[in-house]
Image (cartoon, rainbow, N blue to C red):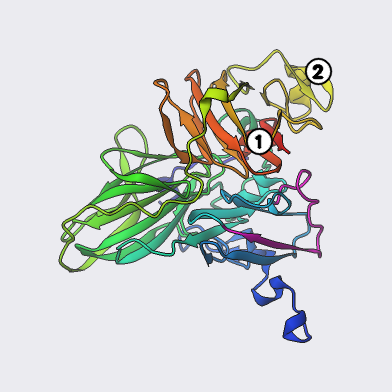
Amino acid sequence: MTITLNRRAFCGGLAGAAIARPAWAATDPLIAQKASVQLAPEGYPATPVWSYGGSIPGPLIRVPQGGRVTRRLVNDLEVPTSVHWHGIRIDNAMDGVAGLTQDAVPPGETFDYDFAVPDAGTYWYHAHTNSMEQVARGLSGVLIVDEATPPDVDRDEVLMLDDWLLDPDTGSFVEPFTHPMMMSHGGRTGNLIGVNGQYAYRMQAETGERLRLRLINAANARIFGLKLDGMTGWTVALDGMPLDTPEKVSGEIVLAPAQRVDLIVDITATDGPAGLLMSLDGDTWEALVDVSITGTRPPRDTAPAPLPANPNTALPDLSQARALDMVMEGGAMAGMDSALFQGDRLDFRALIDRGQFWALAGQAGLSETPFAELSRGEVVRVRLDNRTAFPHGMHLHGMHFREVRADGAMGPLRDTILSIPNTPLEIAFTADNPGKWLLHCHMLAHAASGMTTWINVS
C-alpha cells in the first residue's frame, strides 16, 4: 500500500607488469551492489538500497577536461544493469543503454567503460537497464569535468537533489515500482526529499564567501522549484554547458529531472537564515539546504566572469535544417487512440494491458527502426507537440541541442528540456556524433511505459 507523506510529515587481484594493465585497472571499479543507507532521519529504519560502492549517491568521479573516464562496472546485484553517462558527448559504444548500445551486464559479470570527456561541466551517471526502478533504488552518482581554468570562487559544492518513496515503518522503498498510477500520471514521486543522500543537508559558509553550487536533479519525476535565501547568485551553466554571459538569479529556479544548473553565489546573510529553498505548495518555501554562517570575509564587488566555453558552441544553421515532428501522447486524462508497439498497432486499452501508457510520434517504446535516420553533420529541427496532461523532461543522448524560440533566436545548449502540455516547443541540433542515440522522457516511469525512441546518425 502506498503511504503518502510530505517532507515535513515524514520528519514528524589483477596482477602482472604495469605495462600490461588495461586502462580500467588504474582506477577503482564501480561496484553495483546492495547496501543499507540511512536516508530517513535518525529514528527511522535504514533503507535497503542498490548503490554504487555502498553509498547514496555513488562515488564522485572527477576528471579534467580532455581526460578520460575509465571505470570497470562490477555487477554484484541479482539483476542485469548498465551505466549511462548523462550529458557527455560520448562514444556510442560507451553510452550504456542496454538493448541499444550494449548488452546489459549480467549478475556477477563486468563491463569496462573507457571514454574521453570533451566538455567541462556538471554531469552525472546512472543505471540504464530498467532505469525507473534501478535509479529509484539508488544507482546514480556525480561526474564532474573540471575546466583548465576554474572560476574565481572560494569553494565548489555539489548538491545532488533526489527524492525517495519510502515506507516509514520499515524504511524500505514502496513497491511495486510499476504501479499504474505512477506510470500513467506524473511518475514516481517520493515522500522524502534530500540532498547528497541526506534528509537534512547542512553547509557552513561565511558572509562574503563566493561559492560555486552544482545542482543536479536525480529524482525520478519531481520537478524542483528553488530559490536562494541569504545569498545572491548568477546562473553560469545549464546541463554542464556554460552560458555566454552569467545571468542574475532573480526568481524561481526550475530544475526538471536530469537537468543541472551551475550557480555562482555570494553569501549575504550575516547571522542566518540562509540556504537553498524548495517550493512546497503555493507560496510555501522550505529549506532544502541549510547554511550556517560561521564568520565574515570581504565580499567581492564584481559579478562572476563567464565560464570558459566548451568546443561545441557553434549555432546550427537552420536555413537547411530538416524539420521533424514529435507528437507526445498518452497518459491519464488525455490518452491516445492507438500506437505502434512491437510492430503492431494497438488501441489504448490494449497498450495499457501491456504496460504502455505513452507514445512518441505514434510509437510506444523502442522499435527496431529509429524515429529518424540522420546523416552526420545534418542539422535537425524537432517540434515537440505535448498533447498529454503532464510535463515531460525530454533528454537526448550523445549530443546537445538548443531551443528555437518563437522569434527564431536560439537558447543555450542543453541535453534535457522541460516540455509543458499544449505549449509549443522546438529544439535544433547538429547530428555530429555517429551512433544510435536515445531520445526519451526523463520522468523515468514515462520512459519505461512508452515514451522512449531513438535516432540513428551515420
Judge whether 336 appears above or below 237 on screen.
above
Give percent across and percent down for residue 99: 79, 44
Q: Residue at x 60, y 39 (%)?
A: 396
Q: Is residue 431 magenta?
A: no
User: Element under label 2?
Assistant: strand
Q: Residues within 10 Å of mark 1 (few under 14, many from 20)?
A: many
Asked whether, in this view, residue 294 is left or right of residue 253, the answer is left
Q: Which residue is mark 2?
A: 345
How far, Cα to Cα, is label 1 from label 2? 19 Å
Give percent across and percent down for residue 431: 62, 37
Q: Is residue 114 magenta?
A: yes
Say which amino acid is labelled 1.
Answer: Ala
**On residue 135, which mark appears?**
none
State whether residue 240 appears in this view: yes
How many numbered discs, if any?
A: 2
Q: Residue at x 29, y 67 (%)?
A: 154
Asked whether, in this view, residue 287 is left or right of residue 103, the answer is left
The chief SS type of the magenta part is loop
Say which amino acid is labelled 2.
Answer: Arg
**On residue 447, which mark appears?**
1
Residues shaded magenta: 96-117
For this orientation, the residue located farthest to the bottom is 17
